[in-house]
Image: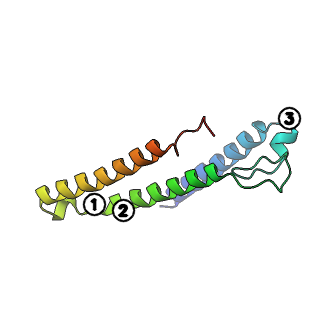
Amino acid sequence: MYLNMFMITIFMMISLIMMILCSIISKKTFMDREKNSPFECGFDPMNSARIPFSMHFFLIAVIFLIFDVEITLIFPLIMVFNFSILNNWIWINLFFMLILLLGVYHEWNQGALDWTSK
């Protein structure tokens, strides 16, 4: 019992020392103005802070949030699989996936997913 605890403690100490050494060895000392500047999504930190917000970036963020929430709605469908009637479960999943695919198609058709034009 005590031998196992001792071995676990030794293993954890060795792992900690190895992680600290790897962190020290892998540090890059190259300092660059762009790498050291603060980063805000959708903004260029080298330009003026008074530039209007990018509407394209905002739309992409909203689309991401919508699809992220929809993915969280898929998890209960997976958990209910064992307790539901297979035919009903398949139809509900197909309907849900159809709504997701129609949403992606609509966003693609409207040009919201076209990165190169904006």
Residue pictured at 83% horizontal, 47% vertical: 37
Residue pictured at 73% horizontal, 43% vertical: 23
Q: Nearer the viewer, mark 2 or mark 3?
A: 2
Helix, strand or loop for disc 3? loop
Helix, strand or loop for disc 1? helix
What is the quadrant of residue 73 in the picture?
bottom left
Give the alpha-carbon distance from disc 1 to disc 2, as whole Å.
7 Å
Residue bearing the label numbered 1? 77
Residue bearing the label numbered 3? 30
- Percent x, y for residue 41? 69, 51
The quadrant of the image that shows the C terminus is: top right
Callout 1: 10 Å neighbours few (<14), some, many (20+)? some
Give the alpha-carbon distance from disc 1 to disc 3, as whole Å.
49 Å
Amino acid type assigned to the residue bearing label 1 in the image: Leu
Amino acid type assigned to the residue bearing label 3 in the image: Phe
Residue pictured at 24% horizontal, 55% vertical: 95
Give the alpha-carbon distance from disc 2 to disc 3, as whole Å.
45 Å
Mark carried by residue 7 = none
Callout 2: 10 Å neighbours few (<14), some, many (20+)? few
- Percent x, y for residue 108? 45, 42
Residue bearing the label numbered 2? 73
